[in-house]
Image (cartoon, rainbow, N blue to C red):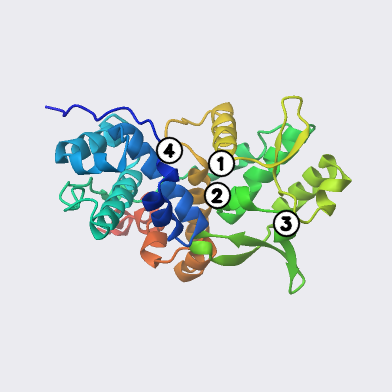
Amino acid sequence: MPTKPLKKPHFDPLSHDLIKYWLKNITSLNSRAAKQVDLLEFFEFIKISSIEDFKRIQRQNIIDWRDSLIGDKNNPNFAVRSVKRKMATVSKFFEYLCDEHVVDVNIVKGVERPKLTSSEGSTSAINEQQARDLLDAPDAKTLKGKRDRAILSTFLFHALRRSELCQLRIKDVQERDGIKQFKVHGKGDKERYIPIHPSALRRIAEYLEASGRGHADDKDAPLFKSLSNNGKNTNNNISPSGVYDLVKHYGAQIGIDVTNFSPHSLRATAATNTLLNGEDLRKVQQWLGHANIQTTAMYDKRDNRPEDSPTYRVRY
C-alpha cells in the first residue's frame, strides 16, 4: 500500500543552507541546474516541509516516487535513463545528509532502479528523407522561419545537445584556421570546437541578416533569440522548452510520430548518419562531447543494417 505523503511544503528548499551548499559544490553549471530540478521534483512529490521531514521518509515513499517517474509501461512519464539519473541525484543527496548527520542511512540506496535494455540505449533517429523534409519545413520568408531553419540545421549538421544550442552566443561563432567554427560549451563545463557546415552557416547568415544589424554586431547577444508574440526579437536566448516545442511542431508538420520525438532525436540522427557514412567512432565521440566511447557506440547501427545481414552471404 502506498504510504501517506508528508505535509505540503511551506518553505523554500533552495534557501536552506544544507541544500544550497550541496548544490554549490557541483562545479558544472549545467549539472547543477539539472540536479536542482531533480531535487525540487522529488521534494514536491514527497511534500517536504522542513529538513526534519527527511528523517520521516520511508522506503515506500521512494518506491512510490520511482514508480511515478516510470509511469505505465505503454505510456512512460520519463525515459529509463532519466529515471536512473533522477534516482542517482537523490541518492547522492541522501549520502550528503548522512555525512551531515541529518539522517542515519541513505534510504534510496536499496531501492531497485529500472534497467536499460539494448533498445533503450539511445534515442531513435529519423531517416535522411525526414531530415531533409524537416530542414525545409519552416517558412523561409519570415524571421521566425529563418531562425527555425538555422536552429534545425545546427542540430542536424552538428549534433549539439539542446542546452548547448541554447547557450550559443554571437561570439561563439569563431574563425579558426580559416574555418568558421562553433565554440560549444558542453557538459562539465568542457569546451569543444565544431566546424560549421556550409548549409548551416548560410542559414545562420540569412537569419542574422533578417534579425537586424544590431544582432550580429553584439558579440554577447544570444545567437538564437526568443521571439515575442508579434514575431519580433527579444534580448533573451531561446529557452530549452522553446526549442523542444519548435522541434515537436515541425516534426508533426512533416508527418513524424512525435510521441518520442525531441531535440535529442536530431542529435541521434546526426551521430548515426556520420557513422553510417564511414566516420571513425573515436572522432564522433569527440564531436559529440562524450566522455565515454561506449555512449557513442550506442549510435553505431552499422552492424544492424538489414542489407548487411549474413542472409545475403549465403551461397548454394
Q: Which amino acid lies under the numbered mark 2 shown in the image of this protein?
A: Ser
Q: CA distance from mark 1 to mark 2?
A: 6 Å
How packed mark 1 is, by other alpha carbons closer than 10 Å (few <14, some 14-19, many 20 or more), is some
Q: Earlier in the sequence, mark 1 or mark 4?
A: 4
- Could you say which is closer to the camera, residue 60 or residue 129? 60
Sequence-earlier tag: 1 or 2: 2
Q: Which residue is mark 1?
A: 240
Residue 179 locus on image (x, y percent): 74, 68
Give the residue type at disc 1: Pro
Q: CA distance from mark 4 to mark 3?
A: 48 Å
Residue 316 x/y as whole percent:
24, 58
Residue 12 numbered tag: 4
> Where is mark 3, residue-wise?
198
Q: Is residue 121 left or right of residue 233?
A: left
Front residue of 277/210: it is: 210
In depth, the one of 309 and 183 nearer the eye is 183
Identify which amino acid the numbered label 3 is placed on. Pro
Give the farthest residue toward the right.
213
Q: Earlier in the sequence, mark 1 or mark 3?
A: 3
Instruction: Nearest to the eye among marks 1 and 4: give it.
Output: 4
